[in-house]
């Protein structure tokens, strides 16, 4: 798997958490470690971009099984900020991951999907 892809809204994010890979990590014992995000707010839209590492337990030791970059897109509503989309790409040398990182400086109006879908 090169890219994890995007999750649209609450239902998409819940589907990622309920997926067999994630549930297997939970069963075995895991930890998700995220860096501080780079946040850009432009009016009623915002993005947050950060790195994440996933560790799981294997043979009585924790090992890193995934390093990725995440871009969260938010919009402001009457009740506060809501997540619109999360895009995730594995840091495995894939050019789409570098493109996603570049977009951190561009803010909410840049679309990460074309770079990820090109692969």
Image: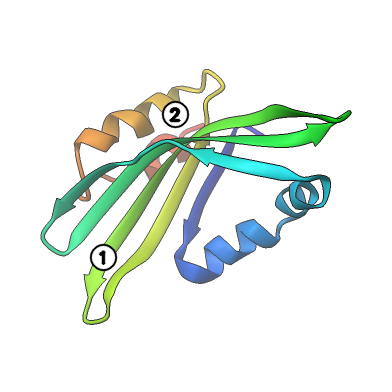
* Viewport quadrant of the N terminus: top right
The one nearer the camera, 115 or 83, is 83
**Label drawn at residue 20:** none
Does 64 sit above or below residue 17?
A: above
- Residue for point 53% across, 45% down: 5
Question: Looking at the picture, how far across and down is residue 119, in whole percent?
Answer: 51, 31
Left/right placement of residue 88 relative to residue 46 reads right
Q: For the residue labelled by badge 2, is the local secondary structure a helix, a strand or a loop?
A: helix
Q: For the residue labelled by badge 1, is the local secondary structure a helix, a strand or a loop?
A: strand
Does 102 sit above or below residue 87?
A: above
Q: Which residue is mark 1?
A: 75
Which is in the foreground here, disc 2 or disc 1? 1
Question: Looking at the picture, how far across and down is residue 107, in whole percent?
Answer: 20, 44
Counting residues from the N terminus, which is met first, the one under dot 2 or under dot 1? 1
Residue occupying the far front of the picture: 60
- Residue for point 39% across, 24% down: 98
- Residue for point 28% across, 50% down: 47
**Label drawn at residue 97:** 2
Left/right placement of residue 52 relative to residue 73 reads right
Q: Toward which corner of the image does residue 35 lie, by quadrant?
A: top left
Labels 2 and 1 touching (C-beta < 8 A): no
């Amino acid at each position: 798997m090169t890219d994890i892809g995007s999750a649209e809204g609450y239902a998409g994010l819940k589907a990622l958490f309920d997926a067999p890979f994630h549930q297997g990590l939970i069963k075995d014992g895991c930890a998700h470690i995220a860096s501080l995000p780079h946040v850009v707010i432009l009016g009623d839209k915002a993005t947050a971009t950060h790195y994440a590492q996933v560790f799981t337990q294997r043979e009585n030791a924790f090992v890193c099984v995934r390093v990725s970059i995440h871009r969260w897109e938010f919009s402001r509503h009457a009740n506060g900020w809501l997540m619109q989309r999360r895009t995730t790409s594995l840091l495995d040398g894939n050019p789409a991951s570098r493109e996603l990182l570049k977009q951190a400086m561009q803010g909410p109006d840049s679309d990460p999907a074309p770079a990820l879908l090109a692969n």
